[in-house]
Amino acid sequence: MKIQISDNLIRHYLSNVYFINGHSYAGKSTMVKMLSERYDMIFCGENYHDVFPREKLSRWKQPGLCYFDTMSGWEEWLNMTPEEHWNWTNQVSQECIEVEILELIRLGASGKKVIVDTNIPPDVLREISDYHRVAILLCDPPDITATRFFDRDDPDKKFMMDQIRKCKDPEATLKNFNSWALYHPPVEIDWQHTGFYTYTRSDFESDTREEMLAALAEHFGLNKGK
């Protein structure tokens, strides 16, 4: 018998978990970090599902999450076509849903509010959460990550650029890597019309973090009772 857990039960156990999803480069990671610090929330940054022990993943049940253990090298991954990359990321996203929900139930059991930079898609969030616990951050233009991905100075971006430089044709590999952000898959999330609260980032030159933080805090009701 395949185990299934009803959405109303999951919703109850995630009642103090707040989710942020949306476009790349829209400020999700920054907002999750700032909200966790400002409102004393448990921080779950990007890829928090990595807390699950890799050795306990199954290559048959979680092939997407196990891909980096089976690939021939970084050049193979970096030279996926946009369609291949989208198929892989979609597979990983689906596999992560179970891991993330279980981890969030564990964290939420403390009674403390939890703020999450999540990849759980809107259709699933509609089943396990509600309007005032989900925010969708958007970019205008939405594909800005294709030109500004490496503007952010963090270890992951540096590692990725180092691997691109090691490829046989770094210029072609970088071009291919940037093309992933421009690919429009056959089934694409309509981030503008999820039914959840949205906040659009269109100013990429000024520091608008406090403005965005205030809007999200109001939406999540984090100032109530203060």
Image (cartoon, helix red, strand yellow):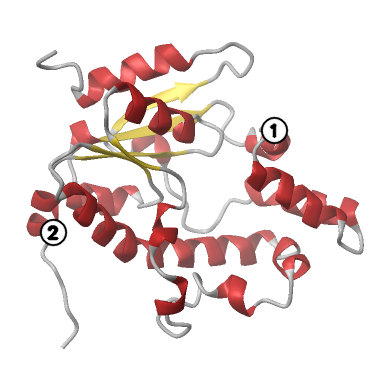
Q: Quadrant of the N terminus?
A: bottom left
Q: Quadrant of the C terminus?
A: top left
> Is disc 2 surrounded by few (<14), some (14 to 19) or many (20+) residues within 10 Å?
some
Callout 2 amino acid = Asp
Is residue 105 shown left or right of residue 119?
A: left
In the image shown, does 194 or 115 lie closer to the viewer? 115
Callout 1 amino acid = Arg
Residue drawn 59% across and 11% down?
A: 206
Residue positioned most to the bottom:
1
Query: Are dots 1 and 2 in contact, CB under 8 Å?
Result: no
The answer to whether residue 185 is above or below residue 137 is: below
Residue that carries the numbered disc 2 in the rendered image: 7
Query: Quarter-wise, where is residue 20 in the image?
Result: top left
Element marked by disc 1: helix
Residue that carries the numbered disc 1 in the rendered image: 148
In the image shown, does 187 or 181 lie closer to the viewer? 181
Q: CA distance from mark 1 to mark 2?
A: 38 Å
Element marked by disc 2: helix
Residue 31: percent from the left, percent from the top? 42, 28
Residue 216: percent from the left, percent from the top? 31, 22
Is residue 86 shown left or right of residue 113?
A: right
Is residue 216 shown left or right of residue 10?
A: right
Query: Quarter-wise, where is residue 151 in the image?
Result: top right
The answer to whether residue 218 is above or below residue 30 is: above
Residue 218: percent from the left, percent from the top? 24, 17
Residue drawn 44% across and 60% down?
A: 50
